[in-house]
Image: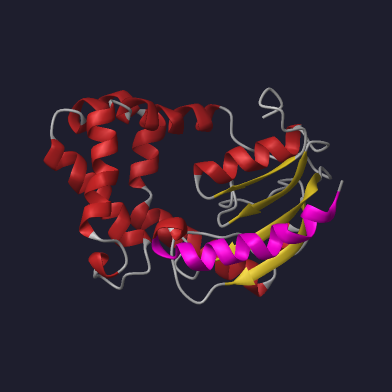
Amino acid sequence: MAELGYHRFAARGGDIGAGVSVWLARLFPDVVRGIHLNFIPGSYRPPTSADTAPVTLQEQAYLDHVAQWSAQEGAYAALQGTKPQTLSFSLTDSPVGLAAWMTKKFRSWTDCHGDLESVIPLDDLLTDISLYWFGGSLTGSLRLYKENRLRPLVFKQGERVKPPLGVSVFPREIAMSPRSWVERVFDVQRWTEMPAGGHFAALEKPDLLAAEMRAFFRPFRKLT
């Protein structure tokens, strides 16, 4: 961004994009004005492993949800994080196999109540699958999980990410850390419970997400 002439900027993301945004804020706090997320990287564990504070009922409910979700939905991450190349041979050999692998995630992680096309049009879904199939980017997208596993985003006890944070909590997000945990590391200035949407919020509810982004970032325009 600096090479493009932007000396102050903001970042926003979900999923891997959330991780990129957090790393930017963590490494360049004097450049990043703020970040907006709809997913908290590393949300499957408390941000400070050495913290001995008692777990609240809300935090325990989150831990129970994560354990259940991991048992039912987490096999993909274990495979992609340990043996990505093996999976890559299969998915790059069969467009039907790739479509099945990806569509399962869309159906399970969106706020669609079993009717995927009610939230993501078929053409959009096929376009997304085609980007991986024709773009030759599948292997790299799987390898990313192993690299993240080797260097996870873990915060040190007492560490703070300085740029302000805004969070949009969509009800069908796969896992979202309790605000009490997020505030241990981040300067949370906006936390909004959204009425609908899931993990792919930018695709499912773009208008709702865009409105939240504008509301969070608008005050920063006045800063010099």
- Near-viewer residue (144 or 127): 127
- Magenta stretch in the rendered image: 204-223
Left or right relative to 117: residue 27: right
| Residue 97: quarter of image | top left
Residue 50 spot, x, y in % from top left: 76, 46
Taking the spot 73% from the left edge, 60% from the top edge, the residue there is: 218
Residue 52 in view, yes or no: no
Taking the spot 23% from the left edge, 33% from the top edge, the residue there is: 133
- Establish if 36 lies above or below 215: above
Q: Quadrant of the N terminus?
A: top right
- Near-viewer residue (68 or 194): 194
Q: Is residue 220 magenta?
A: yes
Residue 73 spot, x, y in % from top left: 35, 54
| Residue 76: quarter of image | top left
Taking the spot 31% from the left edge, 30% from the top edge, the residue there is: 138
Left or right relative to 71: residue 23: right
Give the colour scheme shown: secondary structure
Residue 176 spot, x, y in % from top left: 56, 60
Left or right relative to 173: residue 179: right
Q: Is residue 71 magenta?
A: no
